Amino acid sequence: MIKLAIYGKGGIGKSTVACNISAALAAKGLRVMQIGCDPKADSTSLLRGGERIPTVLQITREKGSALTLEDVVFEGTNGVKCVEAGGPVPGLGCAGRGIINALETLEKKGAFEICKPDIVIYDVLGDVVCGGFSMPMRKGYADKVFVVTSGEKMSVYAAANICMAIDNFKGRGYASLGGIILNRRGVEDELAAAQTLAADFGSTVIADIDRCTEIPAAEKAGKTVAEVCPDSEARRQLDAAAQAVLDSFGGVR
């Protein structure tokens, strides 16, 4: 089973990238599970026609130990299994602790043994890399982390912080940096900025996604790019990103 995490600054398009990668891998016949680790709980919405699903934390508050996988695992585009960790009641509790509790609940309920995914993708907010937000990097969760960034200064800054966190976990058996995914915003020298970031951490830019009209159009429709614009260059680039992620593992294990 391949386990990976996709991190990025809020608003940089990491969930859009994650959903399109999940759908593209599932279209290859692979069993994919995407787990949203963002308190906004909208990671999987593009795989569900724009619909949000009940979160693990929400159902835990309602049902406690009576929670079942059927309560929190939903099928999305191309059969992708969709899960949202969720967050605490606003003003009460810690979002990071909530992610930890949600992931531990999924383990206790045997989510991976029952669903038997070939690939698990954790979609994680990367504005902070502490507590529960670093959970998917830890031993037993993701094996590799892919960081989504544009060439914008604050995006590169956030991406560098994520890469530093990964670097600091070296030697503990935690996830390694799988590569940088450039999601362009039309600023000057974007590729060079992403390549410099990658080189600083001994990595590479594994995917380059142009700024375009097709991705926002698909987001507005609540769907993946392949569903809305199947013959577009954006679809080709996102499919190439999915293949690059898969290739970095040497195929499905």
Image (cartoon, rainbow, N blue to C red):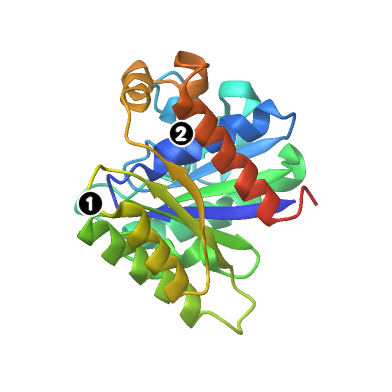
Q: Position of residue 44 (x, y in %)?
A: 46, 33
First reached walking from the N terminus: tag 2 or tag 1 = 2
Q: Position of residue 28 (x, y in %)?
A: 71, 30
Q: Say what secondary structure mark 2 lies in.
A: loop
The residue lying furthest to the left in this view is 91
**In the picture shown, does residue 108 fall above or below 73?**
below
Q: Say what secondary structure mark 1 lies in.
A: loop
Q: Position of residue 130 (x, y in %)?
A: 37, 70
Dot label at residue 44:
2
**In the picture shown, does residue 174 fall above or below 183?**
below
- Is residue 104 toward the left or the right of residue 210 in the image? right
Dot label at residue 188:
1
- Is residue 12 toward the left or the right of residue 124 in the image? left
Quadrant position of residue 104:
bottom right
**Which one is in front, 87 or 49?**
49
- Is residue 155 toward the left or the right of residue 66 in the image? left
**In the picture shown, does residue 153 fall above or below 234?**
below
